[in-house]
Image (cartoon, coloured by chain):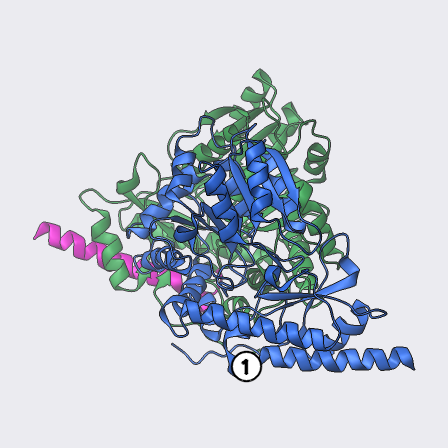
Chain colours: A blue, B green
Amino acid sequence: MSSFTQEPHKLLVIPGPIEVTDEVLYANAHPSMSHISPDFIPVFGDCIRMMRQVLFTQDAQPFIIAGSGTLGWDQVSANLIEPGENVLVLNSGYFGDSFADCLRTYGANVDSVQAPFGAAVTPSEVEAALKAKKYKAVTFTHVDTSTGVLTDAQGIAAAVKRVSPDTLVVADAVCSVASEEIRFDDWGLDVVLTASQKGLSTPPGLSILVASQKAIKVFETRASPVTSYYASWKKWLPIMTAYETGNAAYFATPPVNLIYAFNASLTQLTKQAPSLEERFRLHKEASQRMKQAALDMGMKQLPLDMSVAANGMTALWFPEGITAADILGPLAKQDIVVAGGLHKDHKLKYFRIGHMGISAVDKNRADVEKVISALQASLAEAKASKNA
Amino acid sequence: MSSFTQEPHKLLVIPGPIEVTDEVLYANAHPSMSHISPDFIPVFGDCIRMMRQVLFTQDAQPFIIAGSGTLGWDQVSANLIEPGENVLVLNSGYFGDSFADCLRTYGANVDSVQAPFGAAVTPSEVEAALKAKKYKAVTFTHVDTSTGVLTDAQGIAAAVKRVSPDTLVVADAVCSVASEEIRFDDWGLDVVLTASQKGLSTPPGLSILVASQKAIKVFETRASPVTSYYASWKKWLPIMTAYETGNAAYFATPPVNLIYAFNASLTQLTKQAPSLEERFRLHKEASQRMKQAALDMGMKQLPLDMSVAANGMTALWFPEGITAADILGPLAKQDIVVAGGLHKDHKLKYFRIGHMGISAVDKNRADVEKVISALQASLAEAKASKNA
């Protein structure tokens, strides 16, 4: 291991990509390796095994594929849903709309339960919907990156089990894996789909999906052929099995360097201090510090209540009379990069701060404190200039 | 720019991934950046522009998407072909079978012209097939990585124009872009699809496709909806246009670090010496040195003739009595990694050597010479031990 240190740069505190460790970036600069090399195969195999640990599952099946998080929606839509089947999308923001769009592309009949802006769909709403109609799957966005709204994954899964135990429970957890606690087996989830560049603390470029054995069986017994090639589990399942058992198999060249980087990050998450449980606690603490400071500055969160507020990010309405230009520009001048709004209805009226991975966990970095004090300064300056 | 130097490692001379420069790997270790940062947008935009230069096209449309090269087949099948339309696949190895499989997944009627093992489909065979039946598209594998067979792209395109000018000409150029000359506009190609980890000299993880304006029009005027979500140009075209014109747009998070790495490599390919033309010449020279040396060692190429032999790789039959274990193991002991066979019919009877990118172009590395002398030593040793 060399003493690689990443270049000085602006602090990136958006809800993904996030700041990553030097070890992860150095692994991404690994010399070129054969994707079927005996040195590389266990690196990939260990990623599969460590992904199970991150989600506290014994036997669910991870898929690690070159692609953006979006590809996870295609994996669900193409492998688990057959044309004409009913899917219930719990919609708490931008990403619910998009998942529904993807499901329809593959022929699903989609119904949506729309949460009010800033709220999550509740388990009792899910119960009511499932009593009224049979669904092959229920999908929800665990943390909607556009609003910072956190959905009660455990409660939703329990509601589905009570009313319609056959129905698959699918969590879009792009913005929650490794920053929010997810107990795959205990909660009875069937799919957790995510990406590398948020809580998993790796550069973007990996679509990561974990499927329960029940979901795999649903896939294996489907009547109609899978209508995607690149997203087909028929192609990928033998590849994942091969790499996990120490063999190489070929469908498409894996993104070797990103797999090295992912392995470095998963090793830090699962084998080094702090533990996963401790990491979840540290994310909560960082989140509370950020949200309390925002409140003290007179800024309201998008989520209507702390119980539906994500721990890996904070979405804040601009105070009256303040715009994106007053906050985002001045923060960037202080070398701090936050994100603007994303939800189509309110895009220009709010902004978002990420506090995932080392920004939440490594207190020596004091990232949250840096953001808070820069925000205080920018806000004070903006108010002063408006009053002048 | 730091003085980053990649770790000492075995020389990787397989037909992709290939050895890449320190600058490319260092760019892959770029600190985390926002995908909509004003610093990142032109990095992505320049990749789009430089991709046109690599293929000598004025106005074709590049798509640069997180994924393996395989995703390019989905892009073609889902965007350009409507269910029930006829596609002619020119099959010169493993990858023709797979492209046909992908096309059928999306509902195409596929006919194949199968070249004899070690040969390419000829322009006159294409003419005959197009006279007998109307096809929406003709696809061919420019260099089949499984066999090292080079197809006459210019000749195929000319044949299509003569007989059926409406038919789209689609080149699977995963193993040829930047190691074989491709004149997109002059030859009248409609799609060139490739990946980052071969001639383009970047780590794997990018699906790169360039489509003619004619192909884009065919896509835009299709009657039926695109049946993929992640591979849909309806989603990606506005993103590529946005980044190229200096704006950000969001469909899926781009693989930011790989885009930095790709930019570093494209900059070396298009803006630094040697020129692209010179690079093609150097690939030919390296290829000839390798193939002549193999011949001198008594090894026959898979391609039946030098006119159908790729310049970026060499596929060789093991001599009588020699197996993979006699060659690949001893080479690895000399820190040289070559590839075994891939084509299902002859997998164990041959091996493959890559000589693309810096291994062909940077003569100071003397990669080809290292491989030749290690191969000579391994072969001599194997023969001696068989005779003993």
Is A138 or B289 nearer to us in this picture? A138
Judge whether A199 appears above or below B212 on screen.
Answer: below
Along the line of sight, which residue is nearer the eye, A206 or A185?
Answer: A185
Q: Is residue B245 left or right of residue B387?
A: right
- Give the answer, above or below, for where A374 lies relative to B319: below
Q: Is residue A358 left or right of residue A62?
A: right
> Is residue B75 something that shows in the picture?
no
Q: Residue at x 51, y 24 (%)?
A: B110
Q: Quadrant of the N terminus of chain A?
A: bottom left
Residue A325 in percent (x, y) is at: 80, 70
Q: Looking at this rendering, what residue extends furthest in the top direction?
A: B132
- The residue at the point 92 percent across, 82 percent down is A388
**Looking at the rendering, which quadrant does residue B161 occupy?**
top right
Q: Which residues are magenta?
A: B361-388
Residue B302 visible in the displayed image: yes
Give the x, y percent position of residue A211. Answer: 43, 46
Q: Secondary structure at mark 1?
A: helix
A190 is within the stretch colored magenta: no
The answer to whether residue B383 is magenta is: yes
The furthest residue to the left: B388
Task: Pick whichever, B230 or A133, lies toward us.
Answer: A133
Please indicate whether residue A348 sits to the left or right of residue A225 in the image.
right
Q: Give x and y (percent) for residue B81.
A: 61, 30
x, y percentage for residue A70?
Answer: 57, 49
Residue highlighted by disc 1: A365
**How many C-alpha atoms fall within 10 Å of the one at disc 1: few (<14), some, or many (≥20)?**
few
